[in-house]
């Protein structure tokens, strides 16, 4: 009985150890296998009944076939129980599968509904955008028509104005630049009494005078900037000299550092060759470490100085480049100012248009948000209704399934009770027969267990390898899927960027064509104006030359007449030079006025001398006030202009230069301190070398004394050494043989004792540091 029970347990455990792939077989295969098992079980039950009847006839006869049949019956019943359990498992899996399918169907329906909603929104938005685009096109057409009509009107007005301008040009051929006194006289008179020529001269003076003042201020600024440039160049030259001095000092420091390193190497060689390793090892090692640290610190400071020198040289080159750039930017900033003013006006108009469009889009967006919220609320209510109906159906189906399972379980319990009773009867009868074959069954069991133990680790290894391969494949698949998604996103972004760049390129080409056309048109007009102005200037120069000759002659005549006191003689002189003859009316009038004015001037010159001094003083005060006003206005203008940024940048650079000079002074102080420390170290090193030489001399004298003492009593020393140091030497050799494998180099031993442990540790640390 125990043998059959153990075999059934093994069979069940073997089946449970199988992989989970058997659970994924189809339902039809399981039904077929269950039917086959039922038929075989009925056949075996009938055979078992026949065998029991035969056993009742021959109770004392027990054969091997009877025991095997009973064992098979027991195994079959166990298989039936397992089959029923697996059927229940399969039913549960089916229910879970159906639940998952229902969930997936719900998700699919939700996604379809969302897709339809999105399609409807897209269609509505497309319609709205098409309507908006049509309305915008109509507005643009209307605006273009209005612009065209306005352009025709402006062209007609332009033609009229050009005709008027031609008439005015004919009247304004002979124009001269007004002096300041003439401008004040004309400005004091009424505009109705002034002629058109004088009025134009006044306007030209008013327009040109501020530009002249601006030109003078700009010349002064250019002079100031050139002086600053010269000062900056001088600073650069001084910095270069300082850099060369620092290079020389650095080379000297490097030479001293090399000398120190050579001296340190010599000291190391002396330390290795000498016999003073044990007595003065700690002091020498500490001093050597301190010297190494100081050398490393000197090297670090040297590298820091080199880096600072390189950075200063780079900064000097940058300053040169920036000075050249500032020269170019000063010329370009004036042109940028005019262009930016025009650009600001265009942007203001565009900004107003875009604000109107933004208000329209915000209104549309609010309407779309309200519609989306309403649709989402409807969707939530419908979803809750479907969920409640689905939960009611699930509860009903679960109650039906539980009723069926309870009935089937009761049937299975009754059948199992009957089977156990039959088995007990058969086992009681076969117990006596099984004792004889117990030994054979034990041997078979041992073989089966050994085979099972051999196969089980192989099976586990295969299962582990299969799981690892499956996980690796899944990870690779996920990575590839992620890479594919990422590449798709990158491709979409690149395509969008490419389309946008194409559009930008087309726009830029169109703008370039329009600007080139405007440029050529402006160039042609400017060439025409230049040629016309050159011709006018030539004519005016010729006329001016003639008028200047006439004025010189008239001035001479007037001065001669003014020197004569009698008016009769003065008039005779004037008649002699053509007064009242072929001279035009304007010249007559001018001669009369000039005679009276010359006499008046000669009278007033004497009275005017006293007033000139006062005038000079007041003019000096006025010049001072004008300079102050000019500086204030220039500061105000510079605060609003973009080259204020350049002035601020130059100031910041000056501040940086001052900070760099301070750093240079600090570095020089540090360099002096390091020099002093280096000299002190050299002194201490020389003192140490002298002390070491003294110690070496003393060591040699002591060794000579020891040899003399040992030579006096050799027999006693040999005996004592063998008796005292015998076991210790054995211990030493054994310790050395054990330490060969631990430490790579053996320590040099100068006495009859072993070196201490701290010495070994220090030597290991030194060897490791040298190897690094």
Image: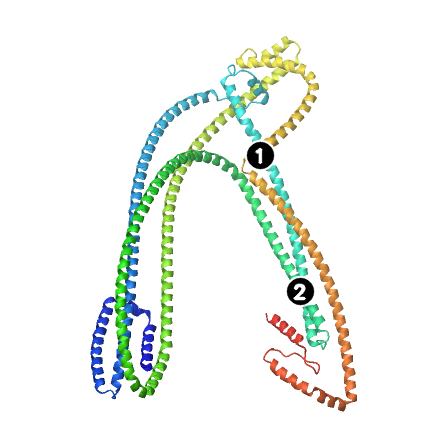
Q: Identify the image quadrant of residue 719.
A: bottom right
Residue 71: x, y in percent? 28, 80
Q: Is residue 425 left or right of residue 577?
A: left
10 shown above or below 614: below
Q: Please report whichever mark, 2 or 1, sits nearer to the chain's N-terminal start.
A: 1
Q: Identify the image quadrant of residue 503.
A: top left
- Mark 1: give few (<14), some (14-19) or many (20+) Cα within 10 Å: few
The residue where tag 1 is placed is: 218
Question: Which quadrant does the C terminus fall into?
Answer: bottom right
Q: Is residue 371 left or right of residue 677?
A: left
Q: Is residue 583 left or right of residue 400?
A: right
Residue 364: x, y in percent? 35, 38
100 shown above or below 24: above
Report helix, strand or loop for mark 2: helix
Residue nearest the viewer, comparing 338 with 225:
338
Residue 332: x, y in percent? 51, 39
Cα distance, mark 2 to mark 1? 61 Å
The residue where tag 2 is placed is: 293
Decide if residue 576 is in sight here.
no
Residue nearest the viewer, comparing 647 with 291:
291
Residue nearest the viewer, comparing 604 with 245:
245
Cβ–Cβ below 8 Å for labels 2 and 1?
no
Instruction: Give the residue displayed 34% in from the left and 29% down from the top.
Output: 148
Decide if residue 452 is in sight here.
yes
- Mark 2: give few (<14), some (14-19) or many (20+) Cα within 10 Å: few
Question: Which quadrant does the N terminus fall into?
Answer: bottom left
Residue 531: x, y in percent? 45, 30
410 shown above or below 228: below
């Amino acid at each position: 009985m125990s043998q059959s029970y153990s075999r059934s347990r093994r069979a069940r455990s073997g089946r449970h150890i199988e992989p989970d792939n058997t659970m994924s077989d189809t339902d039809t295969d399981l039904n077929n296998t269950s039917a086959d098992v039922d038929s075989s079980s009925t056949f075996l039950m009938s055979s078992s009944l026949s065998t029991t009847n035969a056993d009742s006839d021959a109770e004392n006869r027990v054969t091997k076939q009877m025991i095997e049949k009973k064992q098979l019956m027991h195994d079959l019943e166990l298989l039936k129980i397992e089959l029923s359990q697996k059927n229940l498992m399969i039913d549960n899996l089916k229910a879970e599968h159906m639940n998952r399918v229902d969930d997936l169907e719900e998700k699919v329906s939700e996604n379809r509904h969302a897709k339809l909603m999105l399609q409807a929104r897209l269609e509505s938005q497309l319609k709205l955008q098409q309507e908006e685009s049509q309305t915008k096109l109509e507005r643009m057409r209307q605006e273009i028509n209005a612009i065209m009509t306005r352009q025709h009107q402006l062209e007609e007005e332009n033609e009229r104005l050009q005709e008027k301008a031609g008439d005015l040009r004919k009247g304004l051929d002979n124009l001269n630049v007004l002096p300041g006194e003439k401008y004040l006289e004309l400005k004091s008179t009424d505009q109705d009494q002034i002629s058109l020529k004088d009025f134009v001269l006044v306007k030209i003076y008013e327009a040109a005078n501020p530009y002249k003042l601006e030109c003078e201020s700009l010349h002064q600024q250019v002079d100031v900037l050139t002086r600053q440039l010269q000062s900056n160049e001088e600073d650069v030259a001084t910095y270069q000299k300082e850099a060369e001095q620092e290079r020389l000092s650095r080379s000297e420091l490097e030479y001293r550092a090399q000398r120190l390193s050579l001296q340190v190497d010599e000291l190391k060689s002396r330390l290795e060759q000498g016999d003073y390793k044990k007595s003065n090892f700690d002091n020498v090692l500490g001093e050597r470490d301190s010297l190494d640290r100081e050398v490393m610190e000197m090297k670090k400071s040297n590298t820091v100085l080199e880096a600072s020198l390189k950075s200063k040289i780079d900064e000097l080159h940058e300053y040169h480049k920036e000075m050249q750039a500032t020269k170019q930017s000063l010329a370009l900033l004036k042109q940028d100012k005019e262009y930016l003013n025009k650009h600001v006006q265009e942007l203001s108009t565009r900004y107003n248009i875009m604000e109107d469009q933004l208000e329209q889009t915000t209104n549309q967006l609010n309407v779309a948000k309200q519609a989306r919220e309403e649709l989402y609320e409807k969707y939530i209510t419908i979803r809750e209704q479907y969920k409640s109906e689905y939960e009611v159906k699930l509860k009903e189906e679960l109650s039906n399934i539980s009723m069926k399972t309870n009935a089937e379980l009761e049937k299975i319990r009754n059948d199992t009770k009957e089977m156990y009773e039959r088995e007990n009867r058969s086992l009681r009868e076969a117990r006596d027969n099984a004792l004889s074959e117990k030994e054979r069954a034990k041997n078979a069991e041992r073989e089966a267990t050994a085979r099972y133990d051999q196969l089980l680790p192989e099976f586990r290894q295969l299962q582990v390898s299969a799981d690892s391969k499956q996980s690796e494949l899944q990870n690779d698949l996920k990575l590839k899927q992620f890479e594919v998604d990422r590449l798709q996103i990158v491709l979409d972004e690149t395509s969008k960027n490419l389309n946008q760049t194409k559009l930008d390129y087309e726009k830029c080409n169109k703008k370039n064509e329009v600007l080139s056309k405007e440029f050529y048109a402006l160039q042609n007009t400017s060439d025409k104006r230049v040629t016309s102005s050159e011709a006018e200037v030539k004519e005016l120069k010729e006329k001016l030359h003639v008028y200047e000759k006439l004025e010189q002659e008239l001035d001479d005549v007037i001065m001669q007449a003014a020197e004569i006191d009698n008016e009769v003689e003065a008039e005779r002189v004037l008649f002699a030079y053509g007064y009242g003859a072929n001279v035009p009316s304007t010249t007559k009038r001018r001669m009369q006025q000039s005679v009276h004015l010359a006499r008046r001037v000669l009278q007033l010159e004497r009275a005017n001398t006293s007033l000139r001094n006062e005038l000079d003083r007041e003019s000096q005060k006025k010049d001072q006030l004008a300079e102050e006003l000019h500086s204030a206005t220039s500061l105000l203008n510079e605060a609003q202009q973009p080259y204020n940024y350049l002035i601020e940048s130059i100031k910041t650079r000056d501040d940086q230069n001052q900070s760099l000079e301070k750093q240079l002074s600090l570095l020089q102080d540090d360099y002096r301190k390091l020099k002093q420390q280096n000299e002190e170290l050299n002194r201490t090193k020389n003192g140490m070398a002298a002390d070491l030489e003294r110690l070496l001399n003393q060591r040699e004298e002591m060794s000579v004394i020891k040899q003399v003492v040992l030579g006096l009593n050799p027999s006693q020393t040999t005996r004592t050494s063998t008796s005292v140091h015998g076991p210790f030497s054995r211990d030493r050799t054994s310790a050395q043989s054990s330490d060969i494998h631990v430490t790579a180099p053996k320590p040099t031993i100068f006495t009859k004792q072993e070196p201490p442990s701290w010495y070994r540790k220090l030597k290991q640390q030194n060897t490791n540091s040298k190897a690094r």
